[in-house]
Image (cartoon, rainbow, N blue to C red):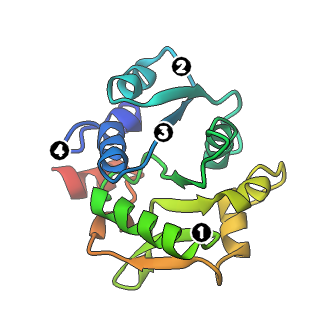
Amino acid sequence: MGSPKPLLDSGQGTFLARILRSFREGGAGPLLVVVRDPEGAVAREARQEGGRVLKNPDPTPGPVASLQVGIRHLPSDAPGVFFCPVDHPLFRPDTVRSMDRAFRDRQPPMVAPSFRGRSGHPVLFSRDLFPELLEDELPQGARTVVGRYHEERILVPVDDPGILVDIDTPDDYARYFS
């Protein structure tokens, strides 16, 4: 992509700043940001945007390793955790609020937003799933646990096409930001 994905310009700040702002304005917190280098540019951006920086000692397993680091650093009374990979920066604060409301009202194992029948990011995992999310053997990362609870999750319909946007390539980036 030419530069670290968290630092790409989203039109409203960096990807990371936009994600943190959506979570903060949506009422989520604390804002934990898991990085490879706790002294690098991404960590500095996270701190500047109000995030608490955590180091991922082994990112080899993929995004689930970052989720696991975050879970281990949550307050003991946290009822759940929102998770969003940095390549999904376009969801809105209203989506976070709607997901949180559904989670608190119905207390499912998992909540995901849905736009026109398709689920997206972020995902909200209940504390009840933390032991499974912390397992060493998750062949498909967090998707392994998502698959186990697919029928029990709550899909929250939102008017937010940003939940479906996954920016992985320069072409993806150009589609949304050129």
- Tell me the residue at 55%/20% (across/down): 37
**Distance CA(mark 4)–CA(mark 1):** 30 Å
Residue at label 3?
Answer: 30
Q: Is residue 116 left or right of residue 85?
A: left
4 vs 3, front mark: 3
Where residue 112 appears, x then y in whole percent? 49, 70
Residue at label 2?
Answer: 38
**Distance CA(mark 3)–CA(mark 2):** 17 Å
Residue furthest to the top:
39
3 vs 2, front mark: 3
Disc 3 is placed on an element classified as: loop
Residue at label 1?
Answer: 110
Identity, as a three-letter code, of the amino acid under mark 1: Met
Say whether residue 156 is visible.
yes
Residue nearest the observer in this picture, 22 or 16: 22
Instruction: Say the numbered circle drawn on residue 11.
Output: 4
